Amino acid sequence: MTINIMKCTLEDLHTLQNISYETFNETFKDQNSPENMSTYLEKAFNLAQLEKELTNPASQFFFVTVNEEVTGYLKVNTDDAQSEDMGDESLEIERIYIKSKFQKHGLGKILFNHAMDLASKNKKTKIWLGVWEKNLNAIAFYEKMGFTQTGAHAFYMGDEKQIDFILTKTL
């Protein structure tokens, strides 16, 4: 099994959209109404929105591949691309998603470690993320990685207000 991480470019726009739809839907469809899922997916992952994010120099996307198949992705933000004002010394992990059939094979940890390396190379002293309060598996994973809850913020899934915990790790 050959695992690689590759940085996404504009040529990857459609692949990024496909993996975004698939992994977000797999992760959250059972806990949300079809209407709210559809509204969110269209807003967050339409081609214009993804192109805007891909061309922002303070955001980066990376695919993880297994035997050349895209199995998941990572999005990190710095500076003004962060979804909360956490300061110049911070790197945000905005998204880590792995296709369900590839979960529990260490791919999420590989992407997480890649984000940690990026933070270190960019001399960041803090790494943070938002995670839905009901996503207990993700919360347990991040706590195992040394994150602690430092706050919370609202996240809208369609018209439903949900709460994301803000988890932070000092480097």
Image: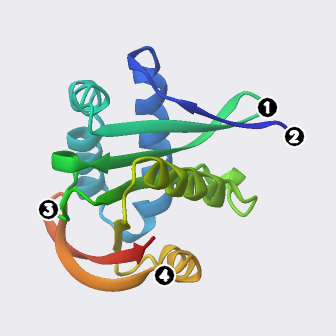
Which one is earlier in the sequence, the residue at label 1 or at label 3?
1
Dot 2 crowding, Cα within 10 Å, few <14, some 14–19, many 20+? few
Q: Nearer the viewer, mark 3 or mark 2?
A: 3
Residue tagged 3:
85
Sooner in the amino-acid sequence: mark 4 or mark 2: 2
The answer to whether residue 17 is above or below residue 97 is above
Task: Out of 11 and 116, give the one closest to the viewer.
Answer: 116
Residue 83 is tagged as none
Query: Is label 1 in a helix, a strand or a loop?
Result: loop
Please tell me which of labels 1 and 2 falls first in the chain. 2
- Amino acid of disc 2: Met
- Residue in view at x 24 percent, y 54 percent: 35
The disc labelled 1 sits on which kind of residue?
Answer: Asn
Compute the Cα span from label 3 to label 4. 25 Å
Q: Residue furthest front?
A: 123
Nearer the N terminus, badge 4 or badge 1?
1
Q: Indicate the position of residue 50 as horizontal and vertical percent values.
A: 29, 31
Q: Is residue 140 left or right of residue 125?
A: right
Q: Between marks 1 and 3, how big is the CA–CA gap?
A: 38 Å
Residue assigned mark 2 = 1
Amino acid on which the number 4 mark rests in the picture: Leu
Q: Categorize mark 4 by other alpha carbons within 10 Å: few (<14), some (14-19), many (20+).
A: few
| Residue 57 against residue 119 in the figure, above or below | above
For residue 36, what is the image quadrant? Answer: bottom left
Task: Tell me the element at label 3.
Answer: loop
Cα gap from disc 3 to disc 2, whole angstroms: 40 Å
Residue 155 horizontal/vertical position (percent): 19, 66
Image quadrant containing the N terminus: top right
Labelled disc at residue 136: 4
| Residue type highlighted by circle 3 | Asp
Q: Which residue is mark 1?
A: 67
Q: Residue at x 23, y 83 (%)?
A: 151
